[in-house]
Image: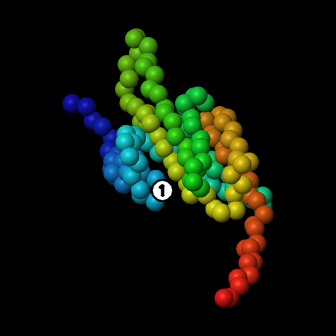
């Protein structure tokens, strides 16, 4: 008989991991809108920071190759998508536990109105994607005189 030390935190972590997978709803945008045809398996964690001249979105994408990442902006929505591929270990190695998530991923963020969509840039380094969204000067509402007939 083997004795195993009981670790309540491990049990809590196992419980929360299962719970997270139920509520994260892969295949949906930040507002919960479903993505048609999406078969997504994980959502990278992301941070958004704001400076005086830009917004910066930092997405953590460990072990994702640069060629497997697509960044786009469509109708005021920043889309980060791609795939983290599982690489099999050597034949003489046994896999005992895998906690990393693999497969397709997707994140979508609605952009504020003051983002300059023509100057957005992205940089990927050390497993972190940084998308810089420069701000533009707010435009004053146009004043129009209307003739009354």
Q: Residue at x 57, y 49 (%)?
A: 74
Image position, residue 77 (x, y; %): 56, 53
Residue placed most toward the observer, 63 or 140: 140
Q: Residue at x 74, y 58 (%)?
A: 135
Residue placed most toward the observer, 127 or 78: 78
Q: Which residue is mark 1?
A: 30
Q: Residue at x 75, y 68 (%)?
A: 139
Q: Residue at x 37, y 42 (%)?
A: 37
Disc 1 crowd, CA 10 A, few/some/many (<14, 14-19, 20+):
few
Image label count: 1
Quadrant of residue 61 in the image? top right
Model colouring: rainbow
Q: Is residue 29 above or below residue 41?
A: below
Horizontal side, residue 97 vs residue 109: left or right? left
Image position, residue 146 (x, y; %): 70, 82
Horizontal side, residue 45 vs residue 23: left or right? right
Image position, residue 116 (x, y; %): 72, 55
**Camera sees residue 20:** no
**Camera sees residue 32:** yes
Quadrant of residue 137 in the image? bottom right
Screen quadrant of the N terminus: top left
């Amino acid at each position: 008989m083997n004795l195993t030390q009981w670790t309540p935190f491990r049990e809590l972590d196992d419980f929360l991991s299962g719970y997270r997978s139920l509520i994260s709803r892969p295949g949906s945008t930040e507002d919960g809108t479903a993505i048609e045809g999406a078969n997504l398996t994980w959502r990278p964690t992301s941070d958004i920071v704001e400076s005086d001249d830009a917004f910066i979105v930092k997405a953590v994408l460990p072990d994702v190759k640069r060629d497997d990442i697509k960044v786009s902006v469509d109708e005021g929505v920043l889309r980060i998508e791609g795939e983290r591929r599982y690489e099999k270990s050597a034949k003489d190695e046994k896999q005992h536990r895998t906690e990393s998530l693999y497969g397709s991923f997707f994140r979508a963020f609605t952009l504020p109105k003051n983002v300059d969509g023509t100057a957005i840039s992205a940089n990927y380094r050390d497993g972190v994607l940084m998308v810089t969204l420069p701000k533009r000067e707010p435009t004053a509402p146009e004043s129009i005189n209307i003739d009354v007939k």
